[in-house]
DNA sequence: CATGAATGAGTGTTCATTCAT
DNA sequence: AATGAATGAACACTCATTCAT
């Protein structure tokens, strides 16, 4: 029984091991997006991944918790990578806000199933569950950085005086709802929605 | 055996039957709020309700779908009753918005577990599931009435020109996020949050 | 707790009690014919009988065994009554044989579901089951009388020397198979079949 | 997970898998013969097979339907193999008829419980059940070949003019009844019975 | 006489996980 | 590094039966 930390770091793993894990994670994302986390059994994931037995999954992951944590990490990683790369180009305080919504709704074109999967994972994360902690930490870290950016805008005299925590909450929840809506409804005009939300929060934040 | 329509009408039910059903629904709400819908087994619900066997639940409800539909109906019923009674007193377009957030966050004092349970139910509702339809209909109906109210404000010259659907989406998602946060964090100042959100959307909607 | 012998005799029963029992037995026959004995639950029977609870059935019958014994008795009673009344008119040894098949296949016009129900009961009767004994006795009694009639024909010089037990077995099994077939297939020509079987066994028995 | 077609082909099965399946099928035959199909629960079958849990059966078979179909296939396979091997040696039209009864009653010495199990399975097969279709097809196919053989005998001038379908029905039902009787009654002289039935149908068919 | 609420064992099936090979 | 067989608990649900009213 070798040490598998399950921390997401790839220390001490061979190449094929890493490849198998990635393959399983990818399959898990598809299955969770389609069936929801509670119905995403090892059986379905193994089938999706083209594996012959569920034992394979247990072999590569310490348990189901380990797997879905990895799944959440992966989704957060690629998503924030995508969004951050778009935001980096924007300066000031108005442009980044517009870019935030645009980038998040553009995400769906790049990774159509990732957001649905993440939504199901977050919705079913029990707060007392130790495995959830990692995910919560990541989310609150993002929240904190958003709050900090809002505070900066207030100090710079661009934003009015509001509670940054609440404003960040509203911004994030609008993003989540819009993304969920866009993922479910193919006729939904995501780009227009992004512009509307940008207008909305521009007015809500400005002096 | 007898006609159990599960539609909320109490036709053909004895008093004790109705009482047992209510007792089971109440227990189910607690369990769903604590463990999440997917982990809310008949066993846990029966234990919470002080019943000796899971068969009792099957005896009073046609199936699990029937039970959780009843649970969702009950939560929506008492919640909207509470909120609507508060909103009815408010006139104009600014006051109702403030009252909306205030009432929704005050809900948690009245029914602390209901919102968490409902959140888990809607999060795990599969769109293809026929039983889900009723719940979806109710939610979209509420959404439509919110949109209509926003449109009215625009016609009255109180609100600026925005997409009412997107604005309603943002308002609802902010409400949901705030309620979820308040339900999880006992230190969260719900009343202050309600005021902040009201300010936020007042600015976002006004001309 | 009054004494209910369940022996089929109606001693000590009130009129309404007897009527209820008859109603339940009738409903049970329908349900058994449609769903088969193993799927004929008290719930289905109560529904068919228009009763509000399964408790009613348990109240009137000591148990499921008691009920299905009564059912079997009733079917055997009306069936043999019908057949015997037809056979009584026939004299000699050839005519009764013809009449036997004709009467048994005509049974289906009178009681379309009875035979299917009885078939399912007999097929699922466990030989060790004490309740089965009564049914077995009745069947063997019929078998014995058939054998005796065949033997008489042999003594009278009308029939060749065969084993009456085997011949009776063949006659009864042909009847059962033909009846089962006729019950399942509405296009089956029962009258023609009766004639064919009469021809068959006339040749098989004659000197 | 892997392809388990349940069609009798052994594609993609390991040796041990095939062995376990066979073991379970064998146990199921015993249990069905003893308790009847409706009472042949996975629990009883697992116990008979010496397995620790009913989950094992579900692991090797897609469901109960799959298992009992395999059981029926197995019984039909070994039985018809046995009978056909005996019939192949016989020429003409009289000898095969005698051999048919002899072989079928000799079956019981080889496979004492198989016939009882099969009887219970066909007796409880619901005609609308899709899984039943395979069994029905097999039986009707056998029936058709028997009819064809009878027709051939008529064309050859060996048999009189009778309805081959009815004659085949009578032959099969006599066989079934005799086999059932022999299986239940250890004192029953099966060989003598076979000779009697052969005499009977020789007379019934000849010109 | 009759009811309906309650019981508890039993149903087939799915689940994540383990382990010898 | 990987496999597939095995495990046992959990799942929703049905059953015949009991009993107080």
Image (cartoon, coloured by chain):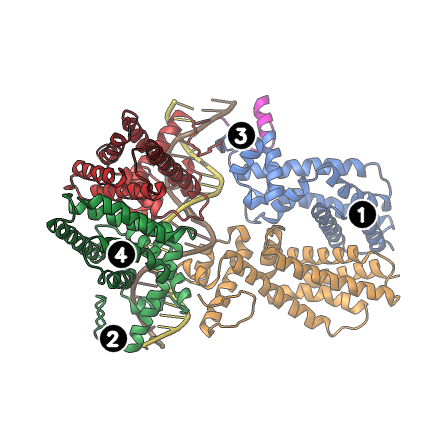
Chain colours: A green, B red, C blue, D orange, E brown, F yellow
Side (left or right) of A151 relative to C38:
left
Quadrant of residue D163 within the rendered picture: bottom right
Is residue C20 part of the magenta span, yes or no?
Answer: yes
Q: Nearer the viewer, residue C130 or A117?
A: A117
Q: Quadrant of the C terminus of chain B?
A: top left
Residue matched to label 2: A13
Residue matched to label 1: C194
Q: Nearer the viewer, residue A105 or A135?
A: A105
What is the C-alpha distance between the residues marked 1 and 3? 40 Å
Local SS, label 1: helix
Mark yes or no: residue D22 visible: yes
Q: Tell me if mark 4 has few (under 14), some (14-19) or many (20+) residues whose alpha carbon lies within 10 angstroms of its own.
A: many
Q: Residue at x 34, y 44 (%)?
A: B166
Side (left or right) of B156 relative to D104:
left
Residue matched to label 3: C51
The boundaries of the magenta stretch are: C1-21
Local SS, label 4: helix
Q: Which mark is residue A99?
A: 4
Quadrant of residue B152 within the rendered picture: top left
Where is residue D90 drawn, in percent x and y? 76, 73
Q: Residue at x 60, y 27 (%)?
A: C10
């Amino acid at each position: 029984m070798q040490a598998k930390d399950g921390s997401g770091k790839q220390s001490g793993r061979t190449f094929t091991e890493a490849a198998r894990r990635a393959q399983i994670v990818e399959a898990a994302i598809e299955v969770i997006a389609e069936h929801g986390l509670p119905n995403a059994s090892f059986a379905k994931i193994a089938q999706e991944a083209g594996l012959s037995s569920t034992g394979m999954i247990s072999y590569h992951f310490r348990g189901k918790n380990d797997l879905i944590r990895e799944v959440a990490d992966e989704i957060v990683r690629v998503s924030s990578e995508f969004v951050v790369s778009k935001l980096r180009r924007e300066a000031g305080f108005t442009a980044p806000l517009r870019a935030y919504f645009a980038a998040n709704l553009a995400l769906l074109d790049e990774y159509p199933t990732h957001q649905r999967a993440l939504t199901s994972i977050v919705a079913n994360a029990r707060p007392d569950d130790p495995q959830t902690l990692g995910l919560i930490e990541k989310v609150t870290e993002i929240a904190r950085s958003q709050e900090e950016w809002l505070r900066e805008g207030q100090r710079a005299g661009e934003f009015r005086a509001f509670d940054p925590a609440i404003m960040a909450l509203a911004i994030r929840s609008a993003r989540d709802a819009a993304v969920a809506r866009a993922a479910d409804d193919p006729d939904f005009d995501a780009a227009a929605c992004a512009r509307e939300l940008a207008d909305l929060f521009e007015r809500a934040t400005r002096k």
